[in-house]
Amino acid sequence: MHSPELLKGTLQTIILKVLKDHGRMYGYEITQRVKELSDSRLLLTEGALYPTLHKLEAEGLLKTETVLLGKRIRKYYTLTTEGKSLVRERVNELVDFIKTMSNVLQVKLA
């Protein structure tokens, strides 16, 4: 598992990319998808996920839809048009950062 400090700086990009690839999702679904994609090496906590989702929503990158399921309410998150257009830029920026860190640390990426 990776340290929470490393995850913190990349969480917005991860969430945006997962939503771009999978469409409308609710919080727990996002955590499970990230866990699956990372072979259980990235475990998102509610304390990290929901503040990030709320921040992305406040920035106009996500929209929410509340659905009543029996007696439970489920909040779904979807990218806005602005969010969709920003994903590629954020992913490219992160990939470039990873390459830069690889050079600084003098390690080769697989």
Image: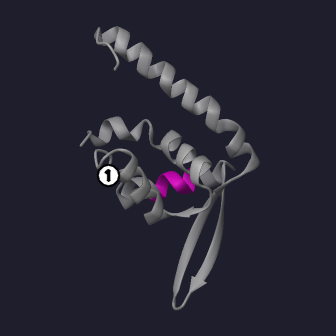
Q: Does residue 76 sit above or below 93 in this rendering?
A: below
Residue shown at the point (61%, 47%) measured from the top left:
20
> Foreground: 33 or 63?
33
Q: Judge the density around disc 1: few (<14), some (14-19), many (≥20) Cα neighbours within 10 Å.
A: many
Quadrant hosting residue 102? top left
The prevailing secondary structure element of the residues shown in magenta is helix
Circle 1 SS class: loop
Q: Position of residue 60 (x, y in %)?
A: 69, 50
Please name the amino acid that badge 1 sits on.
Answer: Leu
Pick the quarter of the image with the N terminus. top left
Q: Which residue corresponds to mark 1? A: 43
Pick the quarter of the image with the C terminus. top left
Residue shown at the point (53%, 55%) measured from the top left:
53
Q: Does residue 89 sit above or below 11 in this rendering?
A: above
Q: Which residues are magenta?
A: 50-55
> Foreground: 99 or 9?
99
The furthest residue to the left: 1
Magenta stretch containing residue 89, yes or no?
no
> Foreground: 36 or 48?
36
Q: Is residue 65 left or right of residue 49?
A: right
